[in-house]
Amino acid sequence: MNRRSLLALPALLAARPAGAQPDRLPVVASFSILGDMVTQIAGDRVALRVIAGPDVDAHGFQPRPSDVAALRQAQVVVRNGLGFDAWMDRLVRAAGFRGPVATATDGITPRAMAADAHDHGVTGRRRSHSLGPNSVPDPHAWQDLRLGQVYLRNITAALVAADPDGEATYRRNAEAFASRLAALDAWVRAQVATVPGNRRRVVTSHDAFGYFAAAYGIEFLSPQGVSTEAEPSAAEVARLIRLMREQNITAIFMENMTNPATLRRIAAEIGVPVGGRLYADALSAPGGPAATYEAMFRHNIGLLVPAMRAGAA
């Protein structure tokens, strides 16, 4: 290699993410669930960087300098929107990114939730998302597999626009992914149908299952707001304990992104074991029980249904 080539090498390396093939589309996704969706649709046509990776709490996430560098090399950015990953907007500005930003929730009519329960570290953005004087949108729309299909379409459209040569691959993979999600949705409904209606109540540590509850007919109760940084008051915990006793609720679960102390205290008060760990806002690491979007649903249903059925007459 001559001297001119050596001098040019740093610029060539900076032009694409480390380890990326020169013909792969550089894509940045804000968190692990979106990252898996991109992978299912794009396969090895993209060089993907996920900012908040598996088992990383995307609520109030603090980006690193390396994340700014990744955005400077990207050609497509994929975010959730609805205030969930508002830190991504700041990251895009800090990186001076001028390319397309695909919002996976575009076209979804969001569920409303109490404004005082929804703070992803972006209090100043609440009013721009307001659905009423005391309401903001629930950002966890991926928890309904039918809405997951909207995510799929938005991500596919962004990839096709950025890489027209890969359109056939993206659309073929997206069609297969959509078919699997439709089958998974039917399976979830069939599993929940095995639980008596009066047993479909669950306590979790974080209020992230609003869309899941509406789609599949399960009532979720939580001592904590939507933010994983929220701390329930003693009165809120006491009310939840009273309700669990009155309704004989025995299904109680932690989530992978929350502090388990409060939930363990409630379980001890009620005298029931914590049923396991649900995945809501982040996937597990590769090899874990919820390493993909589809695996997350299968894992969660595999815990929820037996726990709800326990004690049924």
Image (cartoon, grey):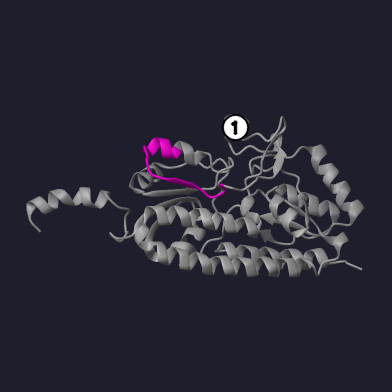
Q: Residue at x 75, y 69 (%)?
A: 191
Quarter of the N terminus within the rendering: bottom left
Relative height, residue 263 to residue 291 (above, below) = above
Question: Does the magenta-highlighted stretch encompass residue 10?
Answer: no
**For this view, does 11 lie left or right of residue 73?**
left
Question: Does the magenta-highlighted stretch encompass residue 105?
Answer: yes
Residue at the disc numbered 1: 128
What x and y, as percent, mark residue 203? 77, 53
Q: Residue at x 50, y 64 (%)?
A: 174
Q: Which residues are magenta?
A: 91-106
Amino acid tagged 1: Ser
Q: Residue at x 30, y 60 (%)?
A: 23
To which quarter of the image does residue 215 belong? bottom right
Please tell me whether mark 1 sits on a helix, a strand or a loop: helix
Q: In this view of the protein, can residue 287 be seen by the observer?
A: no
What x and y, as percent, mark residue 287? 53, 68
Of residue 240 and residue 82, the one placed in the foreground of this image is 82
What x and y, as percent, mark residue 201? 81, 56
Quarter of the C terminus within the rendering: bottom right
Of residue 131 and residue 117, the one placed in the foreground of this image is 131
